C-alpha cells in the first residue's frame, strides 16, 4: 500500500486502508453488542409474545435473527470489509453510480426514524429515572422535559462523534455493561416467574400453529435485516473478513433475541414488555431504577452508532464529500432533534406503520447484493468504478442507473407484500411455509440475475462475459 | 431527510461499451491514492474457510436445530 494512513479517515466515506482498520474482534464485538441492545429488543419480544409462548417464541426468534444476520453479512459484508467502505458505497456495483440513492434513502429514513424513536425513549426513560431517584417530584414532567433531554442527548452524541468511529467505540466501552444488566433482568423474571411463564398463553395467537411459528421466525429475520444500514460503517473498521464473522453473529445478532426475551417474558407474564414497569412489581423501586438506567444507556449507545453510520452514508453524495465532519453530524442529528423536540408523541403513534414499510425493502436489497457479488461478479469489484461515476465506467450502466436492480427491488418488495401485509399482518397461503423475507430476497435475486443477463449482453456493468 | 441531490447528469448520451473509453474526471488526490493502493496491492479476499464454517454453523445449522426443537416443544 502506498497511500499514507490518515487519522481522520474514519470520518470520510472513502475506502479505508488496512493500516487504518484497527478494530480487532473484541472491539468490534463490544461495539456491535452495544449497538444491537436497545429498547427495540423489548418491542420485538413483545411482538413475538403476541403469537408464541416463551420457549417456542425464544427459539423461533433466535433462529430468525441468526438467519437474517447471515443474509445481511453475505450482502454487505464482503465488499465493505475488502475495501473498508460503508453499506451505501457497497450498493453502487448493483444499483449504479446514481441509482445508489435508493438504498441511501432507505438507509437515511430507517436510521433517522429509528434514532428518533430511541432518543425519545431515552428522554422518557431519563424523566422516569429522575422521578424514581427523587430528583423530580411525582407528576407530569414529560411535556417539558422530553424535548430538553432530547436536545441534551443530541448534544452529547454530537460531542462524542466529533471523534469519528473512535467516539462510537468509546461510548460502547462505557455502555457495554447495560448488556449484562439486561441479562440479569432476564434471569430475574425467568427465575421468579418460571411456572407462570411456561403456562402463559399468547394473546393474539392464530388458530394456525404453523402461522404463529413462522411469524416468530419472520419477526426475527426482519429485526436483523434492519441492521443492513448500520453494518458497513462498523465492519469497515476491521481488517478482514475473518475478523468480522463471529463479532457480527455473536455480538450483533445474538444479543437481540436474548434481550428480546425480556420483552417476551414481560408481555406474557406481566402484560408489559417495559422492564421499568414490571421490575417494580418483581423487585421494588431499586430494581426499577436499575432497569431505567439500562434503558437510558442502551438507547444512547445505539443512537450514537446510528448517527455515525448515517453521517458516513451522506459522504457518498458529491455535494457533501468535502463538507466538514461537524457539518455532516449536524445534518444527521438535526432531524432526530427536531422530531424529539416538536412531535415526539405524534411520531410514537405513527412510526410503527412507517417503519414496517421501510423494512420490507431490506430483504430484496440483500438478495440483490448476494447474487451480484457471489454469482454474477464472483467477487470481482472495481473499487475505482465505485467512486468514479463518469459515463463509460462499469457502474454507470445507463445514465448511472441499473434497471435490473430497480426492477428486482420492486419485485422483491411486491413479493413480500403479497405474502405478508406488514401493516395488517394478513398473509397469503404460502407464507406459513416460506416466511415473507426469504422469498422476497429470493425473488429479487432471481429477477436481478435474469435482468443482469440482459445487462451483460448489452456490455454494461463491468461483468465478464463467459 | 438530510439528503443532498446527486450531482447533475452530464449532457451526453452513453455510447456503446467498448466504443468509448471512460471519461476521466480527476478524483480528489487522497481518494486517488487510496484507490491506487487497492489496485496495486494483491486482491483482498472476503471470507476464509473458518468464516464460512462459522456462518454455516451459526447462521444455518444451529437455527435449523433451534427451529426443529421449537416446533416439537
Image (cartoon, coloured by chain):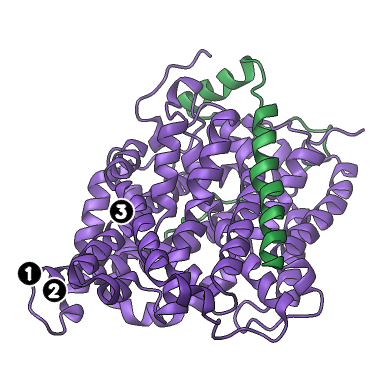
**Is residue B12 in sight in this rendering?**
no
Question: The chain drawn green is chain what?
Answer: B
Q: Relative to residue A421, is residue A44 drawn left or right?
A: left
Position of A330 relative to A39 (above/below): above
**Quadrant in which residue A132 is drawn:** bottom left
Q: Secondary structure at mark 2?
A: helix
Location of the C terminus of chain A (image quadrant): top right
Do tag 2 and tag 1 residues touch (Cβ < 8 Å)?
A: yes
Q: Are marks 1 and 3 on the same chain?
A: yes
Q: Relative to residue A293, is residue A314 drawn left or right?
A: right
- Residue B72 % position (x, y): 71, 66
User: In the rendered image of this protein, which colour is used for chain A?
Assistant: purple
Q: Which residue is mark 3?
A: A330
User: Alpha-carbon neighbours of circle 3 within 10 Å: few (<14), some, or many (≥20)?
Assistant: some
Q: Relative to residue A114, is residue A443 drawn left or right?
A: right
Q: Between residues A418 and A453, which one lies in front from this camera angle?
A: A418
Badge 3 sits on which subunit? A
- Residue A417 % position (x, y): 71, 75
Amino acid at each position: 500500500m502506498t497511500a499514507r494512513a490518515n487519522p481522520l479517515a474514519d470520518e470520510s466515506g472513502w475506502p479505508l486502508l488496512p493500516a487504518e482498520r484497527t478494530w480487532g474482534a473484541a472491539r468490534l464485538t463490544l461495539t456491535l453488542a452495544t449497538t444491537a441492545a436497545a429498547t427495540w429488543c423489548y418491542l420485538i419480544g413483545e411482538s413475538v409474545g403476541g403469537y408464541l409462548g416463551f420457549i417456542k417464541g425464544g427459539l423461533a426468534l433466535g433462529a430468525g435473527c441468526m438467519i437474517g444476520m447471515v443474509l445481511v453479512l453475505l450482502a454487505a459484508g464482503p465488499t465493505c470489509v475488502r475495501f473498508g467502505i460503508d453499506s451505501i458505497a457497497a450498493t453502487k456495483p448493483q444499483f449504479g453510480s446514481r441509482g445508489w440513492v435508493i438504498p441511501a434513502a432507505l438507509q437515511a429514513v430507517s436510521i433517522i426514524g429509528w434514532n428518533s424513536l430511541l432518543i425519545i425513549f431515552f428522554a422518557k426513560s431519563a424523566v422516569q429515572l429522575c422521578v424514581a431517584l427523587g430528583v423530580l417530584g411525582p407528576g407530569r414532567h414529560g411535556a417539558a422535559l422530553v424535548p430538553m433531554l432530547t436536545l441534551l442527548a443530541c448534544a452529547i452524541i454530537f460531542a462524542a462523534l466529533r471523534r469519528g468511529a473512535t467516539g462510537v467505540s468509546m461510548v460502547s466501552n462505557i455502555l457495554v455493561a447495560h448488556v449484562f444488566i439486561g441479562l440479569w433482568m432476564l434471569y430475574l423474571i425467568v427465575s421468579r416467574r418460571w411456572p407462570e411463564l411456561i403456562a402463559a398463553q399468547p394473546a393474539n395467537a392464530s388458530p394456525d400453529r404453523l402461522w404463529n411459528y413462522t411469524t416468530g421466525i419472520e419477526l426475527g429475520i426482519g429485526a436483523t435485516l434492519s441492521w443492513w444500514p448500520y453494518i458497513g460503517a462498523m465492519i469497515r473498521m476491521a481488517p478482514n473478513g475473518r475478523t468480522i464473522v463471529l463479532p457480527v453473529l455473536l455480538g450483533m445478532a445474538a444479543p437481540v433475541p436474548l434481550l428480546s426475551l425480556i420483552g417476551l417474558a414481560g408481555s406474557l407474564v406481566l402484560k408489559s414488555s417495559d422492564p421499568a414497569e414490571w421490575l417494580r412489581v418483581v423487585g421494588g423501586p431499586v430494581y426499577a431504577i436499575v432497569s431505567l438506567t439500562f434503558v437510558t444507556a442502551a438507547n444512547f449507545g445505539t443512537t450514537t452508532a446510528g448517527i455515525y453510520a448515517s453521517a458516513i452514508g451522506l459522504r457518498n453524495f458529491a455535494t457533501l464529500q468535502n463538507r466538514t465532519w461537524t457539518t455532516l453530524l449536524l445534518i444527521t442529528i438535526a432531524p432526530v432533534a427536531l422530531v424529539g423536540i416538536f412531535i415526539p408523541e405524534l411520531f410514537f403513534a405513527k412510526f410503527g406503520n412507517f417503519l414496517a414499510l421501510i423494512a420490507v425493502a431490506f430483504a430484496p436489497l440483500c438478495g440483490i447484493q448476494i447474487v451480484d457479488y457471489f454469482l454474477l461478479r464472483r467477487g470481482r469489484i472495481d473499487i475505482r468504478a465505485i467512486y468514479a461515476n463518469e459515463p463509460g465506467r462499469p457502474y454507470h450502466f445507463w445514465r448511472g442507473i441499473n434497471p435490473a436492480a430497480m426492477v428486482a427491488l420492486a419485485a422483491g418488495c411486491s413479493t413480500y407484500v403479497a405474502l405478508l401485509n406488514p401493516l395488517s399482518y394478513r398473509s397469503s397461503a404460502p407464507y406459513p411455509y416460506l416466511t415473507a423475507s426469504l422469498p422476497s430476497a429470493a425473488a429479487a435475486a432471481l429477477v436481478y440475475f435474469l435482468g443482469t443477463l440482459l445487462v451483460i449482453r448489452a456490455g454494461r456493468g463491468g461483468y465478464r462475459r463467459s | 431527510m438530510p439528503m443532498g441531490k446527486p450531482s447533475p447528469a452530464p449532457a451526453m448520451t452513453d455510447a456503446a461499451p467498448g466504443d468509448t473509453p471512460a471519461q476521466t474526471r480527476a478524483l480528489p488526490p487522497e481518494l486517488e491514492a487510496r484507490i491506487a493502493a487497492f489496485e496495486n496491492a494483491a486482491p483482498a479476499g472476503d471470507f476464509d474457510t473458518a468464516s464460512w464454517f462459522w456462518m454455516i454453523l451459526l447462521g444455518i445449522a444451529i437455527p435449523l436445530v433451534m427451529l426443529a426443537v421449537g416446533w416439537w416443544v
